Amino acid sequence: MLRCVSRAAALLALALTFSFPAAAQAVRKFPANALRGEIVITQPPALVLNQKVAARLAPGARIRGADGMLAMSGALVGKKLVVHYTLDPTGNLLDVWVLTAAEFARQPWPSTPAEAATWQFNPDAQVWRRP
């Protein structure tokens, strides 16, 4: 009897192991106010945005790596990252998503608020259309 229970538990664990990778490959949904840019974190919370603009991470900013996990800004110092980001009301970066190759391939994506205001966004397909 105990042997049957342990086999059943092993089969259940094996089934669960193969079901989680599919969830990890889910498409990330970005908000319509997310802009694309390149950042280099110099000394947290300071960073360089698009190779020229000095910017800062907002208090409580969240950085999500390409794997979807939270990343600490200190671990990313000096790395050049292509990201989608949102801004807080004071202009600091609030939410940052490091892009995968597939996410980066989605072109075009606005890099300024002016572009985002004039382009059309399809949130289901996660694509932008220029006018």
Image: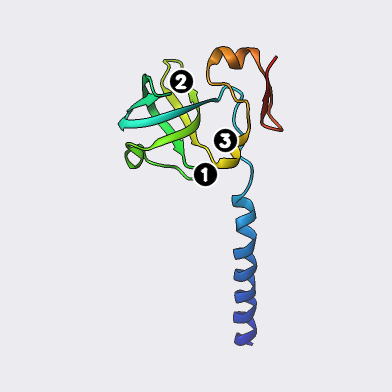
SS of the residue at dot 3? Answer: helix
- Please give the residue where the numbered disc 2 appears in the rendered image: 88
SS of the residue at dot 1? Answer: loop
The image shows residue 65 at horizontal and vertical percentages of 47, 42
The answer to whether 6 is drawn above or below residue 92 in the figure is below
Q: In which quarter of the image is residue 39?
A: top left
Three-letter amino acid code at the position of disc 2:
Asp
Question: Earlier along the polypeptide chain: callout 1 or callout 3?
Answer: 1
Left or right of residue 123, residue 111 in this image? left
As drawn, the label of residue 109 is none
Q: Quadrant of residue 51?
A: top left
The image shows residue 2 at horizontal and vertical percentages of 60, 86
Residues at discs 2 and 3 in contact (Cβ within 8 Å): no
Left or right of residue 51, residue 85 in this image? right
- Please give the residue where the numbered disc 3 appears in the rendered image: 104
The answer to whether 87 is drawn above or below residue 73 in the figure is above
Quadrant, the C terminus: top right
SS of the residue at dot 2? Answer: loop
Between tags 1 and 2, which lies in front?
1
Residue for point 41% across, 15% down: 90
Residue 7 visible here: yes
Left or right of residue 114, residue 90 in this image? left
129 or 58: nearer the eye?
Answer: 129
Residue for point 63% across, 51% down: 23
18 or 102: nearer the eye?
Answer: 102
Residue for point 62% across, 81% down: 7
The image shows residue 72 at horizontal and vertical percentages of 37, 40
Give the spatial CA distance, label 2 vs label 3: 23 Å
Three-letter amino acid code at the position of disc 3:
Phe
Between tags 1 and 3, which lies in front?
3
As drawn, the label of residue 68 is 1
